[in-house]
Image (cartoon, grey):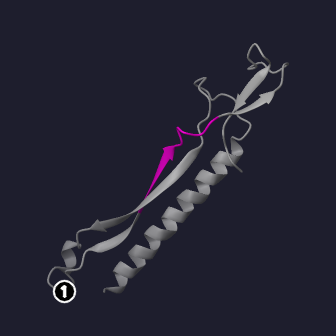
Amino acid sequence: MDYLQVFEISASGMQAQKTRLETAALNLANVHTVAGKDGQPFRPLTVVTHAQQRPAPGRFEGLMAAPAAGVQATVVADTMAQPRMAHEPGHPYADERGMVAYPGVDH
């Protein structure tokens, strides 16, 4: 295996972990967010990772035929997370029972 491919694989893994940390920070930053700019409630985000194979770069044709590998990280909204309900009758977003729906972020 070419050492450049090793660096590419490890860099993709580090990028995936960076994405995971940024997503966790975003979820924690919005744990008390009732509604976004568009008026919709914040949906917790999750990161889905999967292995990735790319064709070998053309500059090494004949030398190294092995495809470069790595990991691909995708951020998706967690649609199954149930909102956390809190009794706050004076809150502007409270319903008729005084309950406010906060994002279902599990810290």
Residue at image location 75% in from the left, 13% down from the top: 96
Q: Which quadrant is the N terminus positioned in?
A: bottom left
Q: Position of residue 49 (x, y in %)?
A: 45, 59
**Which SS class for mark 1?**
loop
- Residue situated furthest left in the rendering: 62
**Above or below, comparing residue 86 to residue 21 in the picture:** above
Residue at image location 85% in from the left, 19% down from the top: 90
Q: Is residue 83 left or right of residue 51?
A: right
Residue at image location 80% in from the left, 19% down from the top: 98
Amino acid carrying label 1: it is: Leu
**Above or below, comparing residue 76 to residue 7 in the picture:** above
Count up the numbered dots: 1
- Residue situated furthest top in the rendering: 96
Query: Relative to the observer, which residue lies in front, 64 or 104?
Result: 104
* Magenta stretch, residue numbers: 72-82
Q: Position of residue 100 (x, y in %)?
A: 75, 25
Q: Is residue 99 left or right of residue 50?
A: right
Query: Relative to the observer, which residue lies in front, 63 or 98?
Result: 98
Question: Image quarter for residue 38?
Answer: top right
Q: Position of residue 58 (x, y in %)?
A: 19, 73
Query: Relative to the observer, which residue lies in front, 3 or 29?
Result: 29
Q: Is residue 76 left or right of residue 43?
A: left
Whether 74 is among the magenta residues is yes
Q: Position of residue 40 (x, y in %)?
A: 59, 26
Q: Residue at label 1?
A: 63
Residue at image location 71% in from the left, 41% down from the top: 31
